[in-house]
Amino acid sequence: MSYVSLKGLRKSYGSLEILKGLDLEIPHHQFTVLLGPSGCGKSTTLRLLAGLEPVSGGKICIDGRDVTRFEPRERDISMVFQNYALYPSMTVEQNMGFGLKARKLPPAEIRQRVHAAADLLGITPLLARRPRELSGGQQQRVAIGRAIVREPKVFLFDEPLSNLDAKLRVEMRAEILQLHRRLKATTIYVTHDQEEAMTMADRIVIMNAGEIEQEGTPEDIFFRPQTRMVAGFIGSPGMNFLPARIEAAGRVSTPVGFFGFVGGGAPGQKVEVGIRPDDLLLARDPATAPDGDTFRGEISLIELLGPRAILHLHVNDTRLLAVVAHDELSGLSVGKSAAFYARPGALHVFERDTGIRL
Ligand code: ADP
Ligand code: MG
């Protein structure tokens, strides 16, 4: 059963329509990630959920109650922001307890809850410090602690790690997930970082221009993107796209040659095919490639990524990326060409006009 439910949620600023009628059901205890390009409406969605701004249309329900017109404090939601939003003049303990004090909880209970949360987050030694005496990661823990002490029904996170350096981001990612496993609070986490989404989410919701493009598990989103937008947005390096034409059932022609695929479509239909760089395989011995569907590409650049390398290929006027393991690089060099084929079953085929998966 869904715990947070958005029905036809709309938001406009003047004549500018930002959210175009979102329908979203978020199950209890799950970690749901809203992922999408900058400006697609993720923060707006969270602000409406938290009650920081009025909706222009539609309905928000939490735990079966319509909270669309409720004040923020009546909604039982805590939000953690990207910029931490700590009070500079207060100690960590005062920052964490502030919301509880405003709700007039007894001081002994505030103290108990703040100390329990500090213990959980490993920040007990910092309780007497002020925000300027803390590192970015410590400030973010305090901001999370302040959200936890309120024991909300729903946690909202708006890009909480984007001000941290790469190493700390990976550590905090794991900490937030461990915290979620312990508290099991329904969480809605916003990010534009696909790696964060893929590693953290039970369920990913991809947003684009104020609408939902696709929802599903990280595997669904990665292996079965339902639109060209999702296919191009997820995966690094990004998917290769080629204009193509269906020749026969399960077979397309492209500017670099023929490929097999799993799925329908009518002969003659114009489509666009996507193939991930990791799914272009070296055909050392062309006879081993399925159906002999290989193509030759000239290598224009080799980018070493440690255990893997990105090959930039030219096939006539078409440019493609392929990823190979480091130990496959022997014999390859810039200016030389090599034969490749597509991993069987790895082709993604989209209608050319709509961008929808066939
Ligand atoms: P995201 O968090 O996905 O990057 P936002 O929800 O912050 O995107 O913003 C979505 C769009 O709404 C952006 O184009 C932004 O410029 C616009 N927007 C956000 N807040 C306002 C506002 N108060 N007035 C006008 N436009 C706004
Ligand atoms: Mg935002």
Image (spheres, helix red, strand yellow):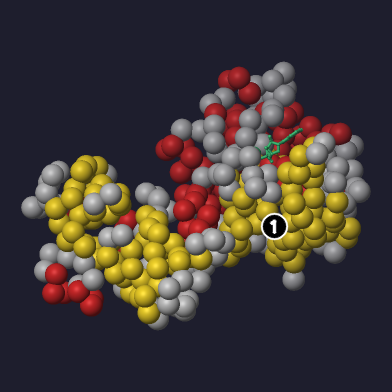
In this rendering, the answer to whether 38 lies above or below 59 is: above
Assign a secondary structure to mark 1.
strand
Confirm or reject: label 1 Cβ below 8 Å from ligand 1. no
Res 58 → quadrant? bottom right
Q: Which residue lies furthest to the bottom in this view?
A: 249
> Residue 158 in the image: x percent, y percent?
65, 41
Q: In which quarter of the image is residue 294?
A: bottom left
Would residue 320 be visible to someone looking at this image?
yes
Q: Residues within 10 Å of mark 1 (few under 14, many from 20)?
A: many
Quarter placement of the N terminus:
bottom right
Q: In which quarter of the image is residue 274?
A: bottom left
Residue at the image point whose x is 47% and y is 53% from the top: 232
Q: Which of 70 and 288 is in front in this view?
A: 288
Image position of 186 (left or right of 225): right
Can you give x and y, in whole percent of width and height, for residue 157 in the image?
A: 65, 44
Task: Name which residue lies at 72% across and 61% down.
Answer: 24
Q: Provide the residue designation for mark 1.
A: 186
For ligand 1, give the image quadrant: top right
Counting from the top left corner in percent of width and height, residue 273 is at: 41, 63
The residue sitting at the front extreme is 268
Front in this rendered view, residue 329 or 238? 238
Does residue 202 appear in this view? Answer: no
Number of marks in picture:
1
* Residue 213 in the figure: left or right of residue 230: right
Left/right of residue 335 with respect to residue 6 in the rendered view: left
Looking at the rendered structure, the kind of residue marked 1 is: Thr
Where residue 237 appears, as percent x and y from the top left, is: 37, 49
Question: Residue at the location (23% across, 71% down)?
Answer: 293
Identity of the residue drawn at 15% across and 57% down: 338
